[in-house]
Amino acid sequence: MKLEVYRDIVSTIHSCWTRECFQTISVKFPRVTNDVLISIYSQEFQKKIKKNHYKHHQPEVIESYYKRYLELVNDGKYELVLLHIAKEIDLSPCILARIILEEYLSHTYCEGESVPKDVLSHMIKDTSLIPNERLSQEIQQCVLTDENCGPLVDNIKHSVGLQYENILEEKLAEWKIPFLGKKH
């Protein structure tokens, strides 16, 4: 791929950043495979997350997100409050879900102290462990909806990586090229 095409793809991604963005770039760049477009989109999304991480993880910002979540839940205007807020603040739904879950657990069970990261990760992966049914359902929707972050996406990336490793190992063996696999 020519550098000019790559830069045009990146520019297009930066101009849309919505769920429909992938459809836009796949129509605009029909000669580029979906795997390549997904890879470029994922890389740019990760850069965006890293660039804006500090903005969303300041204590006063976290507290404001949590208060906003509680207000909107009590208001009853939105069925999926976390997804609404994530869109509103331009943040990955799974990242927001983790922030809100951590605040909820901190306020409810940990007397304001930090929640162990492994507990959070476990609850995000298995939302039935979350004691608040509404929050559990909301986080489950975030996990199912988020195309860029979260345990579902991580499992897909891991699976694809293993598939490509297997293909590579098969090709190397077929061509009789010596290599050290994971087993060694």
Image (cartoon, rainbow, N blue to C red):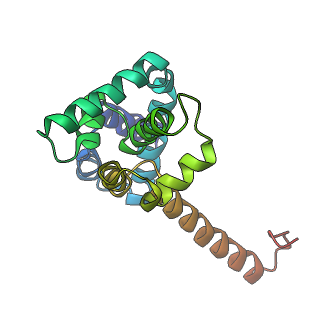
Q: Where is 121 relative to 74, above or below? A: below
Q: Nearer the viewer, residue 11 or 96?
A: 96
Drawn side of residue 116 relative to residue 179, left or right: left
Drawn side of residue 178 relative to residue 101, left or right: right
Q: Nearer the viewer, residue 64 or 29?
A: 64
Q: Which of 73 and 62 is in front in this view?
A: 73
Percent coordinates x, y for residue 162 in the rendering: 62, 69
Drawn side of residue 126 relative to residue 81, left or right: right
Q: Quadrant of residue 144?
A: bottom left
Q: Where is 165 relative to 125, above or below? A: below
Residue at x 58%, y 38% (from the top left corner): 115
Q: Quadrant of residue 17?
A: top left
Residue at x 31%, y 31% (from the top left corner): 90
Residue at x 54%, y 46% (from the top left corner): 120
Drawn side of residue 95 relative to residue 137, left or right: right
Q: How many marks?
A: 0
